[in-house]
Image: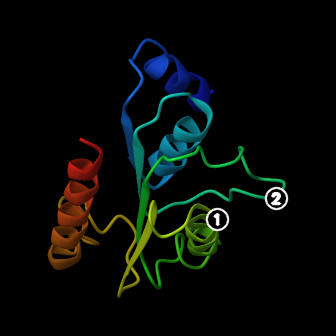
Amino acid sequence: MLDGRADQAVADLPEGLVYAGVSWGAATAQRIAQTRSGARGALLYEACLPVTGEWAVGPWPDRVPVQIHGMDQDPFFALEGDLDAARELVGIVGPELAELFVYPGDRHLFTDRALPSYDAEATALVVRRSRDLLDRVG
């Protein structure tokens, strides 16, 4: 149901977009970047879906850059398989187009300043690195 809503939300948008999301939203952004033609890039914060195997939504599109950001001990990102999926994605796509940034810590949703899990220093790096990707695809 939520995937259908996300698909409807982007249905009339032009090609050439960078899709971004945090946690569950990152999974949605990744799925859309992989399945909707014309993605310009993807920014995946604190989640990454497998790109091979039974849970994969399909191959990563050619020449589409991606960044994945998460903490090395985040109970969801690091300890439930997303970090492994991110490493696999970088291995498949290659370091020219895929970047994985792992920050020290055990917090989920560390970029949300409204939550106790917020990490200002890590967030500053996330923002700087994300802007770098946006500048490259701009």
Q: Give the mark nearer the N terminus: 1 vs 2.
A: 2
For residue 130, which quarter of the picture? bottom left
Q: Give the residue at x 54% y 67%.
A: 94
Q: Position of residue 11 (x, y in %)?
A: 49, 16
Q: Position of residue 138 (x, y in %)?
A: 23, 41
Q: Position of residue 67 (x, y in %)?
A: 41, 60
> Is the residue 111 above or below the residue 134 in the image?
below
Q: Return the mark for residue 108.
A: none
Q: Mark 2 is on which residue type?
A: Gly
Q: Give the residue at x 41% y 83%.
A: 106
Residue placed most toward the observer, 116 or 100:
100
> Spatial distance from mark 1 to mark 2, Cα to Cα?
13 Å
Dot 1 crowding, Cα within 10 Å, few <14, some 14–19, many 20+: some
Dot 2 crowding, Cα within 10 Å, few <14, some 14–19, many 20+: few
Q: Quadrant of the N terminus?
A: top right
Q: Mark 1 is on which residue type?
A: Ile
Query: In this rendering, would 71 be left or right of 47?
Result: left
* Pointer 2 residue: 53
* Pointer 1 residue: 92
Q: Give the residue at x 42% y 48%.
A: 42
**Is disc 2 placed on a helix, strand or loop?**
loop
Q: Give the residue at x 76% y 58%.
A: 52
> Is the residue 59 above or below the residue 12 in the image?
below
Q: Are marks 1 and 2 in contact (CB under 8 Å)?
A: no
Residue at the farthest top position: 12
Query: In this rendering, would 18 be left or right of 90?
Result: left
**Is disc 1 placed on a helix, strand or loop?**
helix
For residue 40, which quarter of the picture? top left
Nearest-to-viewer mark from 1 and 2 = 1
Q: Position of residue 89 (x, y in %)?
A: 60, 64
